[in-house]
Amino acid sequence: MMPSLLDDTLMHVAEERLGALLQAQDRGELTPAGQTEITRIMRTLAGRTGPTRLILMAGLPGSGKTTVARELEARGFLRLCPDERVFEQHGHYGRDFPRGSYKIRERPILGEIATQLRTALAAGRDAVLDHGLWTAAERQEWRQLGEDAGAVVTLLYLPATHDELWDRIKERNASTFDDPNAMYFSEEDLLRHGARFEPPGADEPHVIYTGSLVPVIEGSA
């Protein structure tokens, strides 16, 4: 068999296997080993080589973090989202548990996610943390976790103006009781969060998101 024909045959087998794994993922039947296999197949099909990747994000509510994280998930990355797990375990913020007590409920979940992330990266699974990481100290903690697991870490910064953020938040507030990623925020909440947010500086390697995932996938950080 000629090399090109062999390559085409292997590519076809890989694509069929990937399709079966993605169907299992849609049905909620994908095993951890299958998750790792998805990453490896998608990396091969995309011609990506090298170490495992971890994508961290810095951005306020409404900056588009979950949209980007889901795009990466579609490319084979494992998406880990603390907000979704808080919603699953405790219900809606402000309805099922008091406003102001979110961090108490989030803290053990972040510990669980850190453990899962270490395991996934060690197994060769690319991952994205769907979380805002408002301070440099938080970002350094997660960056160190990724580097200790042998991953190349890219910090993606999603800047946006107050008006852009508030327009998006007003729209998603309408679905707040049904969507764990649509936590209700008032404009006062947004202003308060904005005052606490520390944008990545020149001393913190990062990629600024401009609408394209190419720099993120290529790891130019």
Image: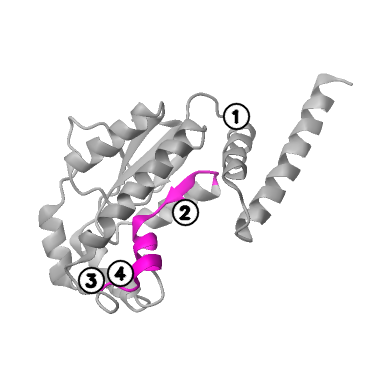
Residue at coordinates 35% horizontally, 56% vertically from top-left? 82
**Distance (Cα) linking label 4 and label 2:** 17 Å
Where does the image place residue 113, in percent across and percent down from the top left?
37, 48
Task: Say whether marks 1 and 4 touch (CB < 8 Å).
Answer: no
Identity of the residue drawn at 23% across and 68% down: 166
- State if disc 3 and disc 4 touch (CB < 8 Å): yes
Left of 150 or right of it: where is 11? right
Between circles 3 and 1, the one closer to the viewer is: 3
Q: CA distance from mark 2 to mark 3?
A: 22 Å
Which quadrant of the figure has residue 150? top left
Q: Residues within 10 Å of mark 1 (few under 14, many from 20)?
A: few
Question: In whole angstroms, how far apart are the C-alphas of marks 3 and 1?
Answer: 42 Å
* Quarter assignment of residue 171: bottom left
**Label located before the other in sequence (3 or 1):** 1
Q: Which residues are magenta?
A: 75-93
The secondary element bearing badge 4 is classed as loop
Mark carried by residue 70? 2
Q: Nearer the viewer, residue 53 or 162?
A: 53
- The reply to whether the C-beta atoms of the residues labelled 3 and 1 are less than 8 Å apart is no
> Which is more foreground, mark 4 or mark 2?
4
Disc 1 marks a residue whose amino acid type is Gly
Give residue 47's mark.
1
- Helix, strand or loop under label 1: loop
* Image position, residue 129 (x, y; %): 37, 47
Q: Is residue 210 visible?
A: no
Residue 152 to residue 183: above or below: above
What amino acid type should be assigned to the residue bearing mark 4?
Answer: Met
Query: Residue sitting at 54 percent across and 50 percent down?
Result: 74
- Mark nearest the camera among 2 and 1 is 2
Which kind of residue does numbered mark 2 sit on? Arg
**To which residue does mark 4 refer?**
183
Q: Which residue is mark 3?
A: 185
